[in-house]
Image (cartoon, coloured by chain):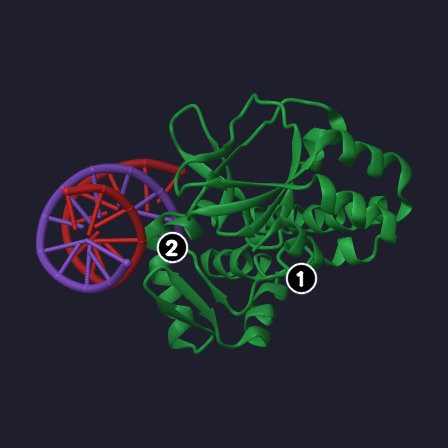
Chain colours: A green, B purple, C red
Amino acid sequence: MAAAEFLETCAWFRRLPQQEQARLRAVTTQRKVAASSYLCRQGERLDHWIGIIHGTAAMVCDSADGRRSTYVILSPGSWFGEGSLIKDEALRFESVAKTDCQLACVPRPVFMDLYDNSVAFSHALIEQLNARCGQFLGNMMFDRMGNAEQRVARSILSLLDPVLYPGTGPLLQLSQEEVGYLAGLSRQVVNGTLKKLEKKGLVEIQFRQISIVDMPALRALVQSV
DNA sequence: GCATTAACACGTA
DNA sequence: TACGTGTTAATGC
């Protein structure tokens, strides 16, 4: 898919005035990143706002003792980097491609100009930041209060947020190991928990895939915290 | 009791 | 072959 074509699929883009759309179409470039290489590294400065055209990537952080945590999954339709661009700060996370990725890149000057001058663009950014903020608050709640089952359910559901993951359907391409990084649980516990959820008819597990079968029941599980 | 790590066998791409 | 998954055993809070 071409970058310009990809932009048309983004809800925030369609809400912009014609001339801003035209400008973005003209300056947005494409980049390919092979699986398991980095989209960007910790300490770098971003010179683009980056959207995922296809593929899956993760924002990860490795602790000093070598343990890895995933904080954000990026899937087709996700955009990231606005935090670093707005603050003009070095990245505090790395972003690594889980599969081959195709990226859309909006140059920093254009991003900043839209941020400063376009109400429609600023609103779209606020909506995205708001959704992320909600995602993080939810994650914190479950880190402190949830049991393993709820934390796994919560991690899965957070990947279905329509603002952050507009291109995601009920089938998640995600290894159990990655769910562990996301939920802050060991792979073994994630495996046991997913099997319990499958037995209850809430999800179906396949190799490197999780399908949501009963969304209302998953939600109920999560809302009981 | 519940979660963690380590270890091993087996499946899948 | 390399990586993900299913399972068990030992250990810790």
Q: Is residue A209 above or below residue A214?
A: above
* Residue under label 1: A162
Residue A88's quadrant in the figure?
top right
Q: Position of residue B10 (x, y in %)?
A: 13, 61
Residues at marks 2 and 1, CA–CA distance in whole angstroms: 21 Å
Residue at 39% x, 63% y is: A209
Query: Within 10 angstroms of label 1, few (less than 14), some, or many (20 or more) residues?
Result: some
Left or right: A213 with respect to C10? right
Q: Quadrant of the C terminus of chain A?
A: bottom right
Read off the chain for label 2. Answer: A
Residue A177 tag number: none
- Mark 2: which secondary structure? loop
Label 2 vs 1, first from the N-terminus? 1
Residue at coordinates 48% horizontally, 52% vertically from top-left? Answer: A55
Residue A159 to residue A119: above or below: below
Amino acid type shown at disc 1 = Pro
Residue designated by label 2:
A175
Residue B6, horizontal then vertical, whole percent: 20, 38
The answer to which of A90 and A116 lies nearer the viewer is A116
- At a point 38% along the width and 28% down the height, the residue shown is A66
Left or right, A180 with respect to A22, comes to left
Instruction: In this rendered view, identify the residue nearer to me: B11 or A77.
Output: A77
Q: Tell me, yes or no, whether the two marked residues, 2 and 1, touch with CB atoms within 8 Å.
A: no
Q: Report which quarter residue A15 is drawn in.
A: bottom right
Residue A42 in the image, given as x and y percentages of width and height: 53, 25
